[in-house]
Image: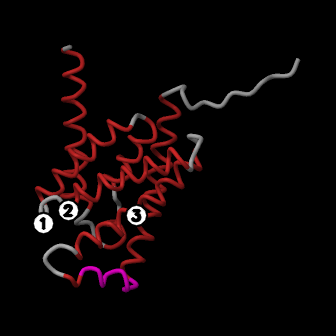
Amino acid sequence: MLKKIGQIVIFFILSSAVAICQFSFINVLPGIWGQINLVLVVAIFTLFFFDWQSALLYGMISGFWLDLMSFEFFGLYLAALLLTIIIAQQILKNFLTNRSFYSFFALITLTTIIYNILIAILFYFSFSANHLSLLIYRSFYLAVFYQIVWSLFLALALFNLATVLTKRFKPFFLVKK
């Protein structure tokens, strides 16, 4: 019982730390460095390597922190992150049958696009309607492209770290006699 509570507390602290690092450090970096979306990559990593409930819990914790620190309407990042995790779960369950490196890359790419479109749509339904016009500007697509590139670099690092630390994803081959 005490071990389970300790795991939940550590998960909460790590989820909070990722969201706070995203908002207070990564988002203020200049140029393309500020396009790193660590929260989304860790959410998809959690969904891909652990389970659905852990990814939703991570999404709720980090989305709450992002909403708490942002100046947009409360619930924007929480809703976008949870919807992205739900869509990613459906993609993972229905289309990407194996848990390979290529599936992880495809899932990261698709969810980055979906997350940015959801943010733009939720901005549109917020107080000002001019945020949906972001979808027609070149800078929006350039920012999404940079987020995809950074997400793929982070995915590469996290996937390799996970395969080194666990034996769950090690390939095995049958040896002929």
Question: Was residue 137 drawn as part of the magenta stretch in this picture?
Answer: yes
Counting from the top left corner in percent of width and height, residue 37 is at 34, 58
Counting from the top left corner in percent of width and height, residue 18 is at 25, 47
Mark number displayed over residue 73: 1
Magenta region's main secondary structure?
helix
Question: What span is in magenta?
Answer: 131-138
Mark 1 vs mark 2, CA separation in Å? 6 Å
Mark 1–mark 3 contact, CB under 8 Å? no
Question: Was residue 47 drawn as part of the magenta stretch in this picture?
Answer: no
Q: Residues within 10 Å of mark 1 (few under 14, many from 20)?
A: few
The image quarter in which residue 172 lies: top right
Counting from the top left corner in percent of width and height, residue 45 is at 41, 44
Mark number displayed over residue 76: 2
Mark 1–mark 2 contact, CB under 8 Å? yes
Residue holding disc 3:
114
Q: On the picture, is 70 further left or further right than 46?
A: left
Q: Quadrant of the N terminus?
A: top left
The residue under the point 27% across, 42% down is 58
In the rendered structure, which disc, 2 or 3, sits on the residue that comes first in sequence? 2
